[in-house]
Image (cartoon, rainbow, N blue to C red):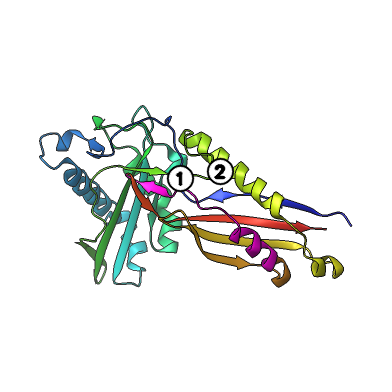
Amino acid sequence: MLRTIFIICTLFTFGSVFPQSDFEYFPQEQILIPACESNSNKSECFYEYLKNQVIAFITDKKRVKQFLKYDKDTLKVGARLVYGLNNDIISEKSFVAIQDKKLGNKYNEDLKDVFYTIDISQIQNRKPLASIHAFSFDFLVDKNGETIAYKHIKNKNVYSGGEVHEIPRFPGCEELSEQQARTCFQEKMQNHIKANFNYPKLAMEKGISGTVYIIFDINRDGKIENIRLNGEYILKEEALRIIKLLPNMSPGMVNGEPVKVPYSIPMHFRL
């Protein structure tokens, strides 16, 4: 009986658009706009500028009726901006999102215009890797008849500048550039699975095939943990065995500090 396995790997981390090189993570990148050039805390000024832009967007008269239908006490708006070498938004790596699904479906695309068309003077302390500028805005919602107002709530996600995200490294991929390490990781992951794969005998006898969806975390020490699987039980056992054989990795990093990174693999078992 012919046995084959097809592996597709997707790493839930941020890609790089710059080559790897030695650099300092701090001070962080700072986005400069004309309105904040004379401000001593330019990151705080930029955050306040964006907050006011978001408030102007969600309080616009043409959107009031739609937002009045929102039935929660708080509203969240988040954004992740990734800038290229020319200080332009890399749209496929960036996003803007309103927490509410219905509002988001209606306005997320429009809200991009608020963030993606910002007049930037320059980005200070530029890094040799792509950096993420992440923003989170929380508001208390106050409805009064046909009017609606929002009070900004300070949250723990304080914006202090750009963050450099680096993917976990599979053993043997440590000295490569970020993009090369991504390709190396995928190849070594697939090679590991193929080298250790055994189609379960009972599954073969019963003619069982299917897909096992695997999610696990690469923790701050580079160890595999919190493995979650979804699929046929017999196939899940084999997938779990293979994942448990993975070696320790070099952990993912944010601004030079180790972080936990989730990884996802759909593993296809076909007879």
Residue 235 shown left or right of residue 37 in the figure: right
Q: Residue furthest top?
A: 86
Q: Amino acid at mark 1?
A: Ile
Q: Is residue 31 above or below residue 213?
A: above
Residue at the spot 36% in from the left edge and 36% down from the top edge = 83
Structural distance between the alpha carbons of marks 2 and 1: 9 Å
Looking at the rendered image, the quarter that the N terminus falls into is bottom right
Is residue 251 located in the magenta-colored stretch of the structure?
Answer: yes
State the SS at label 2.
Answer: helix
The residue that label 2 is drawn on is: 185
Evaluate if marks 2 and 1 touch, with contact meaning CB atoms under 8 Å apart: yes
Disc 1: CA contacts within 10 A as few (<14), some (14-19) or many (>=20): many
Quarter of the rendering containing residue 238: bottom right
Q: Position of residue 88 (x, y in %)?
A: 36, 32
**What's drawn in magenta, residue-wise?**
236-255
Q: Position of residue 212 (x, y in %)?
A: 67, 62
Q: Amino acid at mark 2?
A: Phe
Residue 86 shown left or right of residue 31 in the figure: right
The residue that label 1 is drawn on is: 167
Residue 14 shown left or right of residue 201 in the figure: left
Upstream in sequence: badge 2 or badge 1: 1
Q: Nearer the viewer, residue 69 or 172?
A: 172
Residue at the spot 53% in from the left edge and 54% down from the top edge = 263
